[in-house]
Amino acid sequence: MQTETEIYEADRLTLLDCDKIKLSRTKSGFLSLNYDGREYPRIDATRLMPFYSKTTYISLCYENEEKELREAGVIKDMADLDSEQYRVLEEYLSYKYYMPEITKVYNIRDNMQGSIFVKTDTTSGEKTICVKDWYQNFRMLTDDYLYVCDAEGNKYFCENIHKLDKKSRSVLEMFT
Amino acid sequence: MKLKIKLPPDGRDVHFSLPFGFTAQGEKCDGVFAADDIGIYIYTDGSLTAEYRLTDFAEFRCHRMVGTSMAQGVSENGGETAFCGFSQDMFLRFAEVMKLLEHYVRTGELITDTGEDEPVCPKCGMPLEGGNECVFCRSKGSVMLRLLKMIRPYRKYFFAAVVFTVISQAVWVFVPYLDRVLIDRYVTPKTDNVHGIAVIALSMMTLLAAAGVSDFFNMKNSFRVALNLGKDIREAVFEKSQQLSMSSVSKRTAGELINRISNDAAKIEDFVTANGKDMIVKLLSFIILSTLMFLINPKLALLTLLPTPFALILVKKLEHIMHMNYTRVWKTSVAHSEKLHDILHGIREVKSFGREKQEEERYSRYSLAFTKACIRGETMWYMTQPFAYFIVTAGNYLMLYFGGKMVLGEALTLGQLVQFTTYASMLYDPINWLFQMPRLLADASVSAGKVFEILDERSDVRDIPDPVRLEIKGDIELDDVSFGYRSYDPVLKNITCNIRQGEMIGIVGHSGVGKSTLINLIMRLYDCTGGEIRIDGVPIGDIEQHSLRSQIGVVLQESFLFDGSVYDNISYAKPQAGFEEIIRAAKIANAHEFITKLPDGYNTKVGNKGFQLSGGERQRIAIARAVLNDPRIIILDEATASLDTQTEKMIQQSLAKLTEGRTTIAIAHRLSTLSNADRLFVLDKGRLAETGTHKELMEKKGGYYRLVMAQRQTTKMRAAT
């Protein structure tokens, strides 16, 4: 339940002072936070704009006693954290947002039933990605950024398809 | 589902063992998660690194993150322990293991017989969903074959079209023969047999007239087949979109569905009109003309046909490229339709935010992308077309050279050569047509594929064979009901309660707690993932969906009024209702008075989405619509939430009349709205936390009490500011 103060402060963006942040990993798989002496035993970190920036505007949320989600605050730029804190947060975010990057596209087969099979090289090895409803799940978020969600819910990305080799670009051309 | 995928490296005998790729702390590893009836064993990179006793936990769950998920145990005091992390392809298996382990610690029963995996397509790995053939890996030919099968009801007209085309083609084949007779009998010998020439001219004229008549009947029948086929496809897709469950329909935007119903059906219609019968006729023409040419002179015929195999290879090569191009055209066309629908649907928001200019630009971008995709496809095609035409007609030049030599050497008459060259040019027509096929076929098969994709989709809420048509009284039982829009992510957990006939139940709780989900389950817009709902003792899954929903009246927060009159909108729930019934319904809903003030009374058009009426008037029409069918169960989902206090009071009076003697389930954020409820159900985190009357729950000082207090505080603060 929201307290009186929380209701009034709901519209305020609480930017955290990176010098006061102490994050650590817990056995629950989440993080714990000590911020300026206040303890948050279970914190989930979220990239507020995951497609635009991976290290800025990181929201730290916790559940209150009523099991309602509350935001402890937002880290404006992870670069302001000290190296150890940066490492802890970066490791957690890399795990949470684990997403192999597509580095090469060999071919794309369209079965004419809404699915495509994309043979790729990714940062996690060679993989044929089966994409169902491809016009929804194989899409360009910007002119450069390709975002793929496969039939099993795994996600892949390519930050800039124009930096791929010529063959990959020509294979992708028809589908992007 | 198979839950023993990768065995523990030390050979331990376990019931479940699954591979994972991340440690509990999120480091990459090669691990095995194993569990038996005593504990959980975590193996990382070949060795046992952690061991847990099942009895230390009260709950097991999977926490879905973005790129990964983790398996966790929760102890009695709420302490969480992460066992491991894994990629999303393992999620369903881990979720199943967690469910079974939790069932074991709750009941002492360990279910280990989890069966095999659902059969999957060996080619793409997608589930076969009860069929023998993978809908994703069917050959391209089968799509077109299926399309042809849809012509069956119109085969009479189809064959008539084929017969008239054959007649017309036969006439055209006979004309060169008359040319040959004219040249060899009357022109070359320079006889003065004018009578013979006149007979030939008259014959030609008669034949051409016959061809014209045949063409007329051919087109008449062709159009009849194509237009009916288009109608059937449009209706089938529309019917299917009505039958599919909410989860299937909500996957697609309205724009995309409209595109499939209208544009894709129209493309197939065009294809059949232009090419349906041509497939048979052109093939026949090719066979007949080739045979005639071989009969006249086999050597020349061979020369003429020499380039054809090369053209076929090119056709095959182009087929894939054109398919890709047309898929792109389709994609941009859908995006364009979706955007158009989106902008027009939200026209009020566009205007109120003054975003017309930006929307114009946004629409132009989509329109331009569509145009560019079309230009690209057509350019690609017309770039290759002249070259392909050259290959196809190359045999003509060889034939002319050698044919000319034969005429000079008197091995062939001039008339025969003219007949031959005419046949050759006629033969290039089916060959050229064949060459056009990749483009035509690609365009039509992309659309056919998209249409069949919808037609083949299985609704996840289906009637059983011989469902019960129940005369509902209004008793509702929820027995250990759990539900998640994704089966592994429950929104409602173990809800058990009874709602008696005629009782009014208020459902309260925070946003996102599962209130609307609960009523969606009672309406069977979705099926429970666990437990059972019974209406008058009959499991909801056994009741015919139409019979169930026709006896439930629903009033939502924003009721949708169809474009039509007030009368049409009220009678929507019961089209056969008499005029008096409709007025009675309107009176119960306190709508009659304002309707009488409308210029055309009950025949007043409500306009697009009822925008000519106020919010309160629209709600009252929705209530009249709900009451008309005399439903036994009434569902009110925030029916008065968007109205001002005065209108709400008026609507409350209408609702009180509506709910009299009927089982009513109402959701409202404004708790005062539920003051007349017999009992309140308080949902918290997907569970039924409290039940009781307002008084009982206030005395209990639990979740409901806190909700009421918070709301009072907010009201006070608002009043103070």
Image (cartoon, coloured by chain):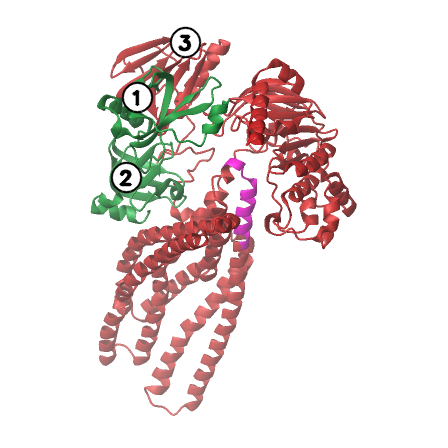
**Amino acid type for the residue under numbered disc 3:** Leu
Q: Nearer the viewer, mark 2 or mark 3?
A: 2
Chain letter for the residue marked with disc 2 in the picture: A
* Label 2 environment density (alpha carbons within 10 Å; few <14, some 14–19, many ≥20): many
Let me know if marks 1 and 3 both belong to one chain: no
Report the residue that reaches farthest toward the bottom. B192
Q: Is residue B638 above or below residue B27?
A: below
- Residue denoted by label 3: B54
Q: Gap in Å between the C-alphas at discs 1 and 3?
A: 39 Å
Instruction: Pick whichever, B485 or B649, lies toward us.
Output: B649
* Place of residue B698 in the rendered image (x, y in percent of width and height, measured from the top left): 63, 17
Instruction: State whether residue B544 appears in this view.
Output: no
* Place of residue B178 in the rendered image (x, y in percent of width and height, measured from the top left): 40, 79
* Label 1 environment density (alpha carbons within 10 Å; few <14, some 14–19, many ≥20): few
* Label 3 environment density (alpha carbons within 10 Å; few <14, some 14–19, many ≥20): many
Q: Gap in Å between the C-alphas at discs 1 and 2?
A: 35 Å
